[in-house]
Image (cartoon, helix red, strand yellow):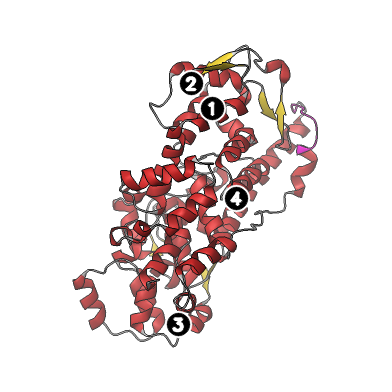
């Protein structure tokens, strides 16, 4: 397997790889490399923070706070939930940076932008996030059914308000438009029938699924030309029968893992594989073994997402943020906050990551993180109330990101590596000849400064 192909595989299935690992993999066959990638992701641990402070509340029966004391307790829980969300965000970043199960974690990140969801209740959000992780390489049909039962999803798409007397169509519409089929591949009558099938689907305080039978429509429905007493699971089974469902997901897979520019022939090949049994692991195995995956046009063809950029830097030079909110702030100014997608359609990705505000920041990010440079860009998007307040007095002012930089880890890895090999390890895209000539003329005192310089050129933005 060519070195560039190994790097391409690891940039797409993960977030790149270090020099030592690359050297070890060069001695292995393509079959071994890909098999080991999947084997490392066979067992994935859930991502968890201490939420014991919420258990007494979530395990109690529903009771609307009426006294001032109860209202104060509820506000305190809501504040604690927002703080725990920041903690969970940082823990997810750490997992993406350090996990050996890189494929499972990269898939989890991918599915978070398919089954898009936002919820300030960390107790439910942690469940949702680990459901993504659990099914990331599992069966897609079971995945969709599990997602339809998640408390956070039920709240986000109003399925909890979906009752027999007055069906709410929001979840049914997004199920088909954003999760399984795409716009134009279903009718308004299909939406109405699906909404009826999901009536009464709700959850208990602890997040477990609960069917409110009195609110469920047990009547006959007609969906995609089939008639029966369908419930939500039946609706999803009928959707899976549509080959368009497999095609819709494979189009997303191709654009995310292969190339933002679609290739109809290759997407159809993926579709034929996926439609057999909706096995996500088998689909990804087929993808990474396809010769066309390693075509030159696909290598370095993607703009790294803010998270991919941030993780890539930290995998090369480990960083500890002295304040977790500053890590959150960086995500915000770059336009991708984990657990906080902009809307139900998620992040658009690719060229949408770049605008006049983010471009300079992305190029300066290595210096900001590794060389105590100043950040002075405006925030964008929205975030939790406490975070808004935290930075309210500092907007549009220059500020430092306070980090502890673990250069010793970098030096241990790269101290004896030539600058040419360091460049080849960090950058997979073809470097502009003028930039390359400039790099060759510059004199760097040590590997650290050369690394920062390499991470600051436009080609580092690509994977």
**Res. 64 visible in picture:** yes
Q: Secondary structure at mark 4?
A: helix
In which quadrant of the rendered image does the N terminus lie? bottom left
Query: Residue 224 got which mark?
Result: 2
| Residue behind mark 1 | 238
Q: Which residue is mark 4?
A: 133
Of callouts 4 and 1, the N-terminal one: 4
* Range of residues picked out in magenta: 58-65
Query: How many circles with numbers are drawn on the protein?
Result: 4
- Quick one: label 2 or label 1, which is nearer the N terminus? 2
Q: Is residue 237 above or below residue 135?
A: above
Q: Which sits in the foreground, 113 or 26?
A: 26
**Of label 4 and label 3, which has the lower sequence position?**
4
Mark 1 or mark 3, which is nearer to you?
1
Q: For marks 4 and 3, give the one nearer the viewer.
A: 4
Alpha-carbon span between mark 2 and mark 1:
8 Å
């Amino acid at each position: 397997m060519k070195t560039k192909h190994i790097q391409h595989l690891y940039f797409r299935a993960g977030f790149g790889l270090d020099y030592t690992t690359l050297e070890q993999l060069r001695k292995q066959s393509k079959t071994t490399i890909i098999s080991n990638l999947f084997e490392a992701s066979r067992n994935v641990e859930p991502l968890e923070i201490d939420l014991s402070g919420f258990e007494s509340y979530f395990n109690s029966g529903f009771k609307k706070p009426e006294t001032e004391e109860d209202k104060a307790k509820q506000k305190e829980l809501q504040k604690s939930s927002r703080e725990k969300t920041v903690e969970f965000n940082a823990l997810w970043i750490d997992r993406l940076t350090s996990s050996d199960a890189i494929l499972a974690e990269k898939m989890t990140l991918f599915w978070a932008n398919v089954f898009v969801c936002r919820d300030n209740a960390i107790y439910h959000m942690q469940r949702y996030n680990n459901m993504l992780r659990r099914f990331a390489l599992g069966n897609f049909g079971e995945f969709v059914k599990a997602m339809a039962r998640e408390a956070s999803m039920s709240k986000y798409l109003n399925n909890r308000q979906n009752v027999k007397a007055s069906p709410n169509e929001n979840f049914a519409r997004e199920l088909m438009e954003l999760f399984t089929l795409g716009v134009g591949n279903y009718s308004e009558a299909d939406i109405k029938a699906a909404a009826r099938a999901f009536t009464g689907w709700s959850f208990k305080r602890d997040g477990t699924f609960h069917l409110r039978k009195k609110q469920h429509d047990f009547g006959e429905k007609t969906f995609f030309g089939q008639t029966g007493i369908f419930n939500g699971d039946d609706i999803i089974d009928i959707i899976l029968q549509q080959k368009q469902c497999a095609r819709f997901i494979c189009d997303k897979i191709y654009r995310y893992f292969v190339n933002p520019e679609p290739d109809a022939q290759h997407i159809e090949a993926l579709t034929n594989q996926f439609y057999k049994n909706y096995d996500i692991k088998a689909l990804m195995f087929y993808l990474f073994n396809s010769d066309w995956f390693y075509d030159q046009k696909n290598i370095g063809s993607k703009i790294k997402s803010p998270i991919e950029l941030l993780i890539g830097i930290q995998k090369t030079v480990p960083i500890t943020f002295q304040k977790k909110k500053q890590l959150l702030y960086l995500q915000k100014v770059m336009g991708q906050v984990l657990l906080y997608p902009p809307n139900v359609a998620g992040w658009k990705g690719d060229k949408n990551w770049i605008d006049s505000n983010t471009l300079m920041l992305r190029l300066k990010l290595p210096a900001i993180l590794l060389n105590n440079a100043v950040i002075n860009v405006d925030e964008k998007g929205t975030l939790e109330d406490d975070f808004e307040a935290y930075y309210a007095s500092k907007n549009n002012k220059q500020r430092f990101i306070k980090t502890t930089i673990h250069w010793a880890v970098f030096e241990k890895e790269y101290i004896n590596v030539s600058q040419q090999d360091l460049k080849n390890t960090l950058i997979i895209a073809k470097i502009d000849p003028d930039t390359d000539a400039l790099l060759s003329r510059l004199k760097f005192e040590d590997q650290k400064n050369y690394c920062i310089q390499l991470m600051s050129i436009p080609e580092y933005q690509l994977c």
